[in-house]
Amino acid sequence: MIYRYDFGTPLETGAIVSDVPVCSGDIRHFTAETDSSGPVSLTIRPGRDDILFGLGETLRSMNKRGYLYRSWNMDDFSHTENKHGIYASHNLLLFTGECGLFGVYIDDPGDVRWDLGYTDIDLVRITSVNGNFSCYIIEEDSLTGICRTFRKLTGRSYIPPPWAFGYIQSRWGYASSEDAERVLNEHRTRHIPLDAVSMDIDYMDRYMDFTWDKDKIPDLKKLCADMRSRHARLIPIIDAGVKQLDGYSVYDEGAEKGFFCKKADGTDFVAGVWPGYSCFPDFFRPAVRTWFGRKYHAMMDAGIEGFWNDMNEPALFYTPEKLQEMRNKARELLKKDAPLTEYETLKHIGSDLPNNDEDYRRFYHVLNGKTVRHDTVHNIYGAHMTMAAAEGAKSFDPDKRFLLFSRSSFAGAHRCGGVWQGDNSSWWSHILLNLRMMPSLNMAGFLYCGADLGGFSCDTTEDLMTRWLQLGVFTPLMRNHSALGAREQEVYRFSTWQDMRSVIRVRYALIPYLYSEFMKCALTDSMMYRPLAFDYPEDPLACRVEDQVMLGEDCMIAPVYEQNARGRCVYLPEAMLMIRFRSPEDADLIPLGKGHHYIDLALNEFPLFIRRGHIIPLVKAAESTDDIDTSSLFLYGWIEKDTSFTIYDDDGFTTAPDLEKGLRHIQVSIRDGKAAAGSDGLSLSTDHLILM
């Protein structure tokens, strides 16, 4: 059941696709408090042991109790625990406990504060700074049911092509055809699976969108064709800012048509980002989205089948106004015989230049025919850039799936593309953060997601890279990405590259299963990754687990995320079969009972837990998704009676797939202490089935 309550004059965010009537009277579960200056707060006092899940891409734990969060999309590469938010705003919060079982979604594109027991441990206060929003209360009989109803409210999740589940190698610094070819050669020579090479801003001509440096990439079409002939693809980055340069066609057209965001005086808003001074397309206007989306066509025509959109919070390095303020302040301080306090001010004088709140109040959009100031709709800017890219892909080829993922996002953008979890760091704690974000993103509908494996900034280590790859085996987006100036972290650069290759080969053996579970979740509005509390709500120990996650219908994952660890403790809420992988061909199958266990895991080993009575299929590992043979499946599981399961398969290109047409049903029977499996057109091995 969904209840909608409107406050002030809500702005259209594009998140909601279902028409829900507005309720009158008091809001369910909450007390509404208004402030004469505009903000509106919703308060509730949950029980001391109640759990709060959600908020999508946020830091800290899966249970959000006890901290202050902010929905305000921000370009902040240092993901430390003192941060209240990063690149995305996913305003869905789930309550379970004494206060009831329900979800609240705040459809507000502006600044929202979530005081979840920070000021008062027993009080939750949700504040819309603008006071103009729609609040949706979702009541169902399970946490999973709440998320499914939310997806009905916001629409079906984006579906990528199957090759997007392959391994992607990326780095800020890849700039040329030779760079892409070298990476591909190094992987193919060593038989390390690879499906794509991702390129950051250095491939562009002076960091200008939809260009490539002809000296570095003289023939993009030939490069794409050569890579495709070797079963790999190229994925370029596209940024939100358009370089302000006469003679640059994208800028000239945008300026001529009035497609850029405006200041109060009607002139184009300008800010510095990677290309220098840039203008920003007003993506809220359909004509602008159509124009910008069609700019992707030239690269698609050259053979590009996937893009990642970046800097679309939008990130602002500086504006002319703030730069002048800084200069004036510095001049005044330099005139003085500066004491320590003024020295500190001078030292930090430029720290408020990037992403300044005052700058976000300097420009305007046209939303549904009305002029709105940017800060009131800030959080949906990146989502509308993703929408422009998706519309551009559809207009180029309506019958083909393209890979699209973005840094900034908002609820509803999950219909158009996936996300990566931003510019993380090569810290052990960020493996755990990667894991914890997966269920929260799934709650908001973002199924295609993942983090920069190995860490983006700082210098990774051999063991950190290995352990992070082991988690990446199970995330839809499996991309190794690092920053310019950081240690080069392609797996072939490490002495243990063969162990890392074995990890990636396990991924390719699992791709048919992972793709199948992804598609079933996308087509039934389910979650691929869940906190244990979703599956075991009556188990108080399971409800508090923060470092294990349910995967699909059948599995649980529990990565090693501590330096020098040679194992870890796990809690099993029911008996499970542990597969301890060293490679697809080398794995131990160990039945374990319900309860706490310490699992030995050498650096080249990692676990997957299969629920008792469940089965998962693996295939022979390949070096690209093109080479995967799905006709021969190796079944893994621990069963005691006849059972069955379904696997999903399709052509990989259909943009409106049909679940029933893609399902393949497999029946497993036990006779005389042996297992036999059957399915039309499939070769099935039961050698890895353990019978109880």
Image: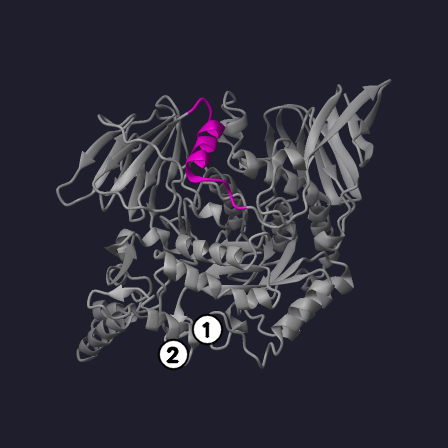
Q: Residue 296: in sight, yes or no? A: yes
Asked whether, in this view, residue 470 is left or right of residue 106, the answer is: right
Q: Residues within 10 Å of mark 1 (few under 14, many from 20)?
A: many
User: Mark 1 and mark 2 in contact (Cβ < 8 Å)?
Assistant: yes
Amino acid bearing label 1 = Met
Name the image quarter holding residue 382: bottom left
- Write down the residue under mark 2: 245
Q: Nearer the viewer, residue 65 or 203?
A: 203
Q: Is residue 20 magenta?
A: no
Instruction: Give the x, y percent position of residue 450.
Output: 55, 49
Between 323 and 574, which is closer to the camera in this rendering? 323
Q: Residue at x 56, y 37 (%)?
A: 523
Residue extent of the magenta highlight: 140-158
Residue 483 in view of the camera? no
Label 2 crowd (10 A; few <14 / some 14-19 / many >=20): some
| Gap in angstroms between the C-alphas marked 2 and 1 | 10 Å
Give the total of numbered labels.
Answer: 2
Foreground of the two, 436 or 145? 145
Q: Main secondary structure of the magenta part?
A: helix
- Residue 496 drawn above or below residue 679: below
| Residue type (three-letter) at the residue carrying disc 2 | Leu
Q: Position of residue 668 (x, y in %)?
A: 77, 25
Q: Is residue 146 magenta?
A: yes
Residue 224 against residue 98 in the figure, above or below: below
Per the rendering, the mark at residue 208 is 1
Quarter of the picture containing the N terminus is top left
Residue at 20% in and 40% down:
8
Q: Is residue 204 above or below residue 105?
A: below
Position in image of residue 293 (x %, y %):
46, 61
User: In the rendered image, which quarter is residue 690 located in?
Assistant: top right
